[in-house]
Amino acid sequence: MPQAVNGSGRPRGYDASRRRQRAEASRREVLAQARELLLSQGFGATTVAQIARAAGVSAEFVYKNFGGKPGLVRAIWDQSLLGSGDVPAEQRSDTAQAEATDPHALMEQFGRFVAEISPIGSPVQLLIRDAAASGDDEMAALLGDVDDARYRRMLHNARQVLARGFLRPGLSETDVADVFFASTTAELYESLVLKRGWPPERFGQFIARTLEANLLGT
């Protein structure tokens, strides 16, 4: 029989599981509140104390789990890469590339991924960019990490698509990666969606046409 705790009749494993669930729920709430406050107020104007208060936890909890504001921003960025579907966006992208039979349909799918992820991720990347420009060394390092990781992902996509034989002749993997990289910048989203008011769907269609023109040549 499982050992009870203080005569409560509940096993130790049950209580430990409940604590883990509560802690995970608290971490999710911290990230949700941090995203809202950081994007609405800016990096410099937002404090850990504000985030903790909004999430109903202690500042110590935030520091213990995320290591302060830079750690929170990194966690929010990582979360944004998952997209809005049940399956992580990168996994869905890999599946689409492996299963595609028509290059134009694949470029359309890339456009839809951009339309899904950009409204979630681009504002966070712009937050990182602006905080780095203000002189925050940790955020400058994070911006470099984000750009490096994004390029590695675009290079991965380039190799996948080239291996399928979908693209016009003469393109190297760096040529293709550069097109993907330039087409998915937060600055492009900022210009067309945030400043010009394009809906995400139109933005995604624009990306699909851009990829077709540069990679398929038709």
Image: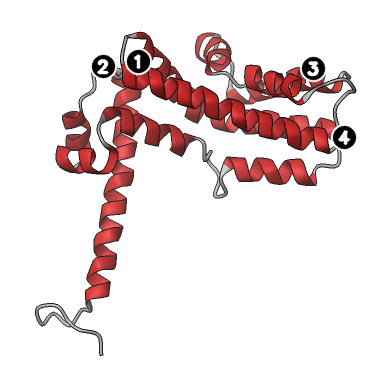
Q: Which element carries disc 1, helix, strand or loop?
A: helix
The answer to whether residue 154 is above or below residue 24 is above
Looking at the rendered structure, the kind of residue marked 1 is Ala
The answer to whether residue 63 is above or below residue 134 is below
- What residue is rendered at 27% in x and 43% in y? 65
The residue carrying mark 1 is 131
Q: What's the distance in space between the residues labelled 1 and 3, CA to CA? A: 33 Å
Mark sitting earlier along the chain (2/4): 2
The residue carrying mark 3 is 214
Tell me residue 21's x, y (percent). 30, 59
The residue carrying mark 2 is 44
Q: Residues within 10 Å of mark 3 (few under 14, many from 20)?
A: some
The residue carrying mark 4 is 165
Q: Which element carries disc 4, helix, strand or loop?
A: loop
Looking at the rendered structure, the kind of residue marked 4 is Gly
- Total label count? 4
